Amino acid sequence: TGPMENSLDKPAISASLESPGMDTGIGYISSASLGLTFEDGVLNFEHYQGDSEAGRIGGDAVLDMSAGLHRYKLHLAPSTLNLETLPTILFGEDSSLSGTMVAALDISGSGWDSPELEGRVALSGEQWMIADHAFNDFTAKASYDNGKVILGAESSVGALSARGNLTLN
């Protein structure tokens, strides 16, 4: 629900969307809601939130179509997720993950055919189990900046870091 103002060739839209449930292709989201605004070629998804099988998720997104080269941003606010109930499309039916993690994600870019992309993800958890192996006080971070990748993870059993290049096709 919400108003549309200005003219059809230059609309200004403000809306609030709610759904009791929806299938996203990678899992079911219940109690979904978001605020949506569109003005001057900029589409904002504000305060989206919903309950997934793994936990409550939320954040915001922007699609800026005001210039020839479209720009976009996606932010997933820190969310506590149950690893056992992550969608099977991510890890398969026989996933051996257990525990909870806090996950946050930021992605931004411009263009569609050969996009310039940048992203960051951060994961943490007090105890994770992977195939009956415990990882206490686990943290991981990854970043991607136009082909350059930096990965880092540490837990009670050790640490890992890597740098390299990645081509997305």
Image (spheres, helix red, strand yellow):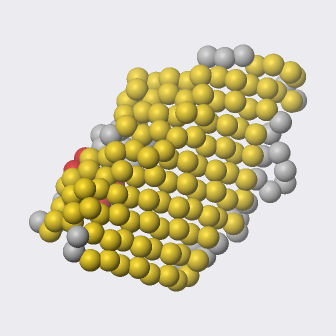
Q: Is residue 88 visible?
A: no
Quarter of the rendering containing residue 22: top left
Of residues 147 and 1, the one drawn nearer to the viewer in this rendering: 147
Kindly identify the residue that appears in the image at 70 percent across and 23 percent down. Answer: 14
The quadrant of the picture occupied by the N terminus is top right
Q: Is residue 54 above or below residue 146?
A: above
Q: Is residue 71 above or below residue 17?
A: below
Q: Is residue 44 visible?
A: yes
The quadrant of the picture occupied by the C terminus is bottom right
Q: Is residue 59 left or right of residue 160?
A: right
Tell me where residue 40 appears, x and y as whole percent.
83, 36
Q: Is residue 149 left or right of residue 127?
A: right
Q: Is residue 69 left or right of residue 102?
A: right
Tell me where residue 156 appears, x and y as whole percent.
23, 70
Kindly identify the residue that appears in the image at 84 percent across and 54 percent down. Answer: 68
Kindly identify the residue that appears in the image at 65 percent across and 22 percent down. Answer: 15
Number of marks drawn: 0
Kindly identify the residue that appears in the image at 50 percent across and 54 percent down. Answer: 105
Q: Is residue 30 left or right of residue 46?
A: left
Tell me where residue 30 appears, x and y as whole percent.
38, 30
Tell me where residue 127 appears, x and y as whole percent.
21, 58
Quarter of the rendering containing residue 7: top right
